[in-house]
Each structure stands twice: as structure tokens, then as C-alpha cells.
Amino acid sequence: MLVNMLIGTTWADTAGSDLKDTGTCFKAQQTLKVTGKVTSSLDGSGLPGVSVVIKGTQAGTATNSSGDYTIDVPGTDAALIFSFIGYETQEVVVGGRNVINIELIESIERLDEVVVTALGITREEKSLGFSIGKVDGEDMIRVAQENVINSLAGKMSGVVISSTGGTGSSVSMVIRGATSLSSDNQPLFVVDGVPVINTLNNITQFGNDNRVDYGNAISDINPDDIESVSVLKGPSAAALYGSRAGNGVVLITTKTGKRSKGVTVNITSNTVIDRPYKFFETQKHFATGYFSFTPENYPGSVMKIDPAQGAGAGIELDKGYLAIQWQSPEDANGNQVPIELVSYPDNFANFVQTGITTTNGASVSSNTEVMNYRLGFTNMSNRGIVPNSDLFRNSLSFSGSVIAHEKLTISTNFNVNRSWSNNRPSSNRGSNPLEWAIKMPVNINILDLEDYWEPGQEGVQQKTPKNGLYNNPYFLAMR
């Protein structure tokens, strides 16, 4: 003690007359040992692993298995920050105290993490024994789709979504891979507690090879009416709904007026533009044929392209060679005149068009102490990427609930949808316009087929490079 006093006196004398300031600098270097315990506000038990950090520094510690901690702080003005996963962060000024006990409050956000399971029952996600994915309704209408399943693409792990055809066709949804070779592996859909069987077999054939996919049942649901979608994965999820849920369960909860504050009117409008940007790679250098002749080695006087020779190994294109082709003009004697062999590498891109989907909707909802309701109407108009293909849908929905007695609540909801199309393109092989657009030989300009009737045989014969071998894609799309 005497040594400290002598040192302090000598320092003060050497520094000059400002003794008060020198003493203050000396005290600022002192540290204070703080101990305490961190407990939970729920049951008062100690919380292990709580982070205790001195504010504005990297220095800190963590509580032990009993929730106790010890830390050295630089002076009485320091502040301690207590943080733990699932609890609210607290900041406390030391203020010269040696013992600081903290009670952490559980975060409200953690308590709100609930999902809808079977029969509309909500449970905390952490209490479930199986994997579950959830998508809010707002995320599904950010980019409007003509089929609600398409809106789930890329939003959940382990879920593969693929379209089986053009506008209005069925959409496949497979959860955690295919489990059967004899079924379509589609999950069970449950809309507000009502099971909906969603298959991929709604295909009708007219005539020869004219198969039209009219879409699956779930495609009639209006995305604007959806509050949330929960996907239950795995065998444990199947136990909730039996064997029908062997491929998983998709729970769809529709909107009600419970969240409204007074009378609320919502108006929505959404437009999505579809434009194909990646196409199949095909050879673009040779005409139809089996041999790549040149004018010098061709076995004849004038080269000729036969569309019946389907192999793409014929005469090389864009070399200035002349040949008689299906669209060659005739001379005065009725003989076809050779024309230059040119490639048309963008045939498929020139055939498809820009797709446009426009969705307009309006809803009115209200919520009081004894009742709530929501009434909505949505109109969807789609122009597909295949020429002359379209899809229209009008959706009317209503949900309401009335508390008739303290122990009796009456609720109802209904959805009425009308979908129609002026022309649904054929799918799969046969009369599919896209099939014949991509099969069109590269030496034929597909735009020459846009006027799809053979001159003089309108309504009888389609224009085609080879009757009986090629179908005109425009004819298939327009008729």
C-alpha cells in the first residue's frame, strides 16, 4: 500500500500540477469482476450456453451448465449483452455492480412457428415427427400461373414439379422421388379438410393420335384464394390420411375474413409473359437425304431434295448449291426450277409465340366479434406459346363463419370455377404441333407453311412438304 502511494505521488509530481486528471486516468485502467446467473422466464431454470459479451468489444464468455457466468468488465460504465437462440436479447449496464442476474424471455416469434396438419389442426413445427414444407399464399401469386402447382416450383426441397404439356395440361408433383412403377406417384391434396384426388390421366383422344390433356383436378383452384400450402413428407405423414397419402400430402388452406380489420377490399392484377429461350439442339447443316452430294458427284443433271428421305445427311446447305425442292416454282412448261439450298435454323423459335397470362381479382372481407366472411372473384386469361392455344378461368369463392352460441360456431365455404378454352393443343406424339415443328427439315422455312391450306384445296388438304409423311404444325394448331 505504501509503495502504491509513493508511485502515485512521484507520478503526480513529475506530471505537474494537474493531479485530479492524472488520478482519473489511473482509475480508468481498473477492471471489475462481475458474476451472476441467467435463467429462463418460463420455469426459472438456468440456461447453459448463453452468450455474454461486453458491448462494443469482442470480449465475452458463456454460461456454464447451471447458467452461471463470470466476466471482467473495464469499469462501471460498461454494458453486457445477453443473447440466446429462441430468447430475446437483453442489454444491461453494469453500474458498479458485482452480481448481475438475468431472466431471459422466450421469443414470441418462436412460439408462432405453427403449421396445419390433418383435419385443420395446427401444431408447432418443432413437435412434428416428420418433415414438412410451407409456402404462404402471397409467395404463390407473386408470379401468376394458370396452374396452382406450378407456383410451388422451386419453393420446397425434395419436391419435383413438371408440366406434361401445354397450357391447361396436367402438372406432375412428386415428393422425394418416385416410389412406384405402376402409379403416377402423385400426392394426396387436401383442400380445407376435403381430400382431392389429383391424377395425370385426364386425357381424351379424338380421331387418330389426337390426344388432349384436360388437366388435373387441382388446376381449378384459384391461387388468389390460397392462404397457405403445407407439404407433409414421409411415411409418418401418410399415417394421418391412410394409404392414399403414401406419396405425401399437400394441405391447402384457403383465405377467410379472420385477418380483416373491419370491411376490407382487395384488388389485384398480375401479368406474366412467357418466352421460350432454350431449344433442342438439332443439326442445321444438311438437307434431308442419305448422301451429301455436291454438283460434281450428283448422279444426275440437276440435284433434287426428296422430303421422304427423312435422314438429315443430305446435301450441305448454305454453300450456294441449287436443287429442286418441294417449294420450287415452275417454269412455263410446268417443270420445277432449282433454287438455292438455304438453312433455317430458327424454325422452332419462329413457330412458338410469346405467352401472356393476365389475372385480375377482387375480394371483400370483414371480421367482427361474432362473424367473419370473405367473398372473392378472379378472372384469368392465358395465351399459350403454341399459336391459337388459350385458357380462361373465372373463380368465385366465399367463406363465412358465425358464432351462434358460445359453444356453437357455424361456418361454410365454397368455390365455383369455370374453365374453358377455344383450343387445347394436342399432347404427346401424333397431333402435337410442337412435335411437327421440331421435326421440320432444316432446309424448309416453317413460315412458308403458315398459310396451312394447299392452294385450290382449301378445307380439304393441308399444305405439307410430303403428304402422308409430314404434318403441318400450323394446321394442327389452328384446326
Image (cartoon, rainbow, N blue to C red):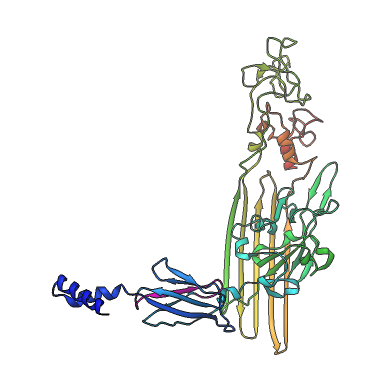
Left/right placement of residue 124 relative to residue 199 reads left
- Does residue 197 lie above or below 347 as drawn? below
User: In the image, residue 367 lies at what x, y percent?
Assistant: 61, 80
Q: Quadrant of the C terminus?
A: top right
Q: Nearer the viewer, residue 213 or 292?
A: 292
Residue 78 on the magenta span: yes
Q: Quadrant of the N terminus?
A: bottom left
- Does residue 198 lie above or below 102 as drawn? above
Residue 302: name its quadrant: top right
Q: Nearer the viewer, residue 439 or 281?
A: 281
Magenta stretch: dominant secondary structure: loop
User: In the image, residue 395 lies at what x, y percent?
Assistant: 69, 64
Residue 275: name its quadrant: top right
- Does residue 142 lie above or below 105 as drawn? above
User: In the image, residue 4 lies at what x, y percent?
Assistant: 25, 76
Residue found at x 69% / y 73%: 127
Left/right placement of residue 450 relative to residue 4 reads right
Query: Is residue 9 in view?
Result: yes
Residue found at x 67% / y 57%: 157
User: In the image, residue 297 lies at what x, y percent?
Assistant: 71, 10
Query: Is residue 104 in view?
Result: no
Residue 73 on the magenta span: no
- Residue lying at the far bottom of the rendered structure: 406
Residue found at x 41% / y 71%: 54
**The magenta segment:** 75-88
Residue 81: name its quadrant: bottom left
